[in-house]
Amino acid sequence: MTGEPDPSAVFATLDDEYARDILVATKTDRLSARELSEACGMSRPTVSRRVNRLVEQGLLEEYTHVDPGGRHYSEYEARLERVDVRLRAAGFDVQIEVRPDPADRVATIFEEMRGD
């Protein structure tokens, strides 16, 4: 995902109970699709569709895990921190707060170390 999350797309996603369950389940732990399926009581195809949408919108981060046997699989962790909606005279003010992208966090650390 590039840029800021689109509020209308985020609202549509958050209207989906399965997507909300995935975000809650991955708030504190990275989980695989199999673990999400078990934890949230949904089929693997349902998990896959929701995870893809959440990753596209930057609300969920995907990590590749390699187990000791050399198998690769994805694990997911929520990036969504907060959605703030305020009614103003001119309409709604919507702010969506997500944790920074891991690559951006690393770049920021290096910039701070160099004094940029």
Image (cartoon, rainbow, N blue to C red):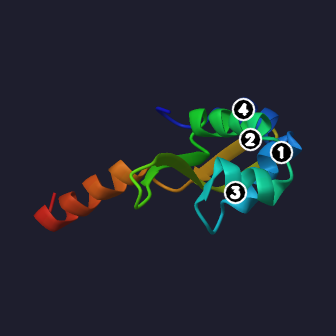
**Gap between marks 2 and 4 measured at Cα:** 6 Å
Q: Are marks 1 and 2 in contact (CB under 8 Å)?
A: yes
Image height of 32 relative to 55, above or below: below
Dot 1 alpha-carbon crowd within 10 angstroms: few under 14, some 14 to 19, many 20 or more: some
Residue 10 percent location from the top left of the image: 72, 37
Residue 73 lies left or right of residue 84; in this view the side is left
Residue at x 45% of width, y 48% of height:
71
Q: Tell me the element at label 4.
A: helix
Q: Secondary structure at mark 3?
A: helix
Residue toward you, 1 or 92 = 1
Q: CA distance from mark 1 to mark 3?
A: 14 Å
Q: Would residue 116 appear left or right of 87 to someone viewing this image? A: left
Residue 113 in view here: yes
Which residue does the numbered mark 3 point to in the structure image? 35
Q: Can residue 86 be seen?
A: no
Q: Residue 5: x and y, percent?
A: 60, 37
Pointers 2 and 4 in contact (CB under 8 A)?
yes
Residue type highlighted by circle 2: Val
Q: Secondary structure at mark 2?
A: helix
Q: Amino acid at mark 3?
A: Glu
Q: Which mark is residue 47?
A: 2
The mark that comes first in sequence, 3 or 4, is 3
Q: Residues within 10 Å of mark 3 (few under 14, many from 20)?
A: some
Query: Which residue is under mark 1?
Result: 18
Q: Residue at 11%, 62% (x, y): give it.
A: 114
Residue positioned 44% across, 58% down in the render: 67
Q: CA distance from mark 1 to mark 2?
A: 8 Å
Q: Secondary structure at mark 1?
A: helix
Identify which residue, 97 or 59, lies in the foreground. 59
User: Which residue shows up at 41% across the image and 56% down it?
Assistant: 69
Residue type at tag 4? Arg
